[in-house]
Amino acid sequence: MGRELLIKFENKRDLSEFAKQIAIFLRGENLEKRESDFYTSGYYFKFQTIKNEVSIYEADSEKFVDFDFSVYFNNDEPLLNLTIKKLVENLISPGDEAAIPESPLIDSKIEFCRKNKLGQVEWIVV
């Protein structure tokens, strides 16, 4: 089972630029844009890392209505949670928010991350 990361930016960003940024940070290879009617925008981005396959798309979750993008890690590899947290802490700016659901179940725990105006990272588990 994979893991999902959802991001909400205070200032709107372009999906393709966001996907490039994620691929660079995770040292991904072969970033490609793929068409699919499954996704709201009609397309998504996909790339490989050494241990994972990563998909990036516009978020369309009923649970996370205001979130902009979703990053899905296909393999729940060892240390994946740490990798996701480091990614979040490097991606977000003050005013942005990230959510990491423990599972796709509605009542699962969710870790939220924000940066305050001083740039300090705050993690909250709900």
Image (cartoon, grey):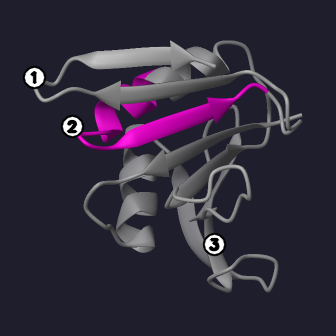
Q: Residue at x 44, y 70 (%)?
A: 15
Q: Amino acid at mark 2?
A: Pro
Residue 33: x and y, percent? 58, 77
Q: Which residue is mark 1?
A: 118
Q: Secondary structure at mark 3?
A: strand
- Find disc 3 in the rendering and name its residue: 44
Question: Could you tell me which residue is drawn at 43 percent across and 27 percent down?
Answer: 113
Q: Position of residue 16 (x, y in %)?
A: 43, 72
Earlier residue among tags 3 and 1: 3
Q: Are marks 3 and 2 in contact (CB under 8 Å)?
A: no
Residue type highlighted by circle 1? Leu
* Residue at 77%, 83% in the rendered image: 36
Vertical placement of 111 versus 60: above or below?
above
Residue 111 lies in quadrant: top right
Q: Residue furthest left?
A: 118
* Real-space Cα separation, disc 3 to disc 2, in angstroms: 26 Å
Mark 1 touches mark 2? (CB < 8 Å): yes
Q: Nearer the viewer, residue 49 or 100?
A: 100
Mark earlier in primary sequence (3, 2): 3
Rendered location of residue 23, percent (x, y): 46, 50
Q: Where on the picture, by quarter, is residue 73?
A: top right
Cα–Cα gap, marks 1 and 2 = 8 Å
Magenta extent: 86-102
**Is 93 positioned to the left or the right of 86 in the image?**
left
Front one among 91 and 101: 101
Label 3 close to label 1 by CB (< 8 Å):
no
- Give the secondary structure at mark 1: loop
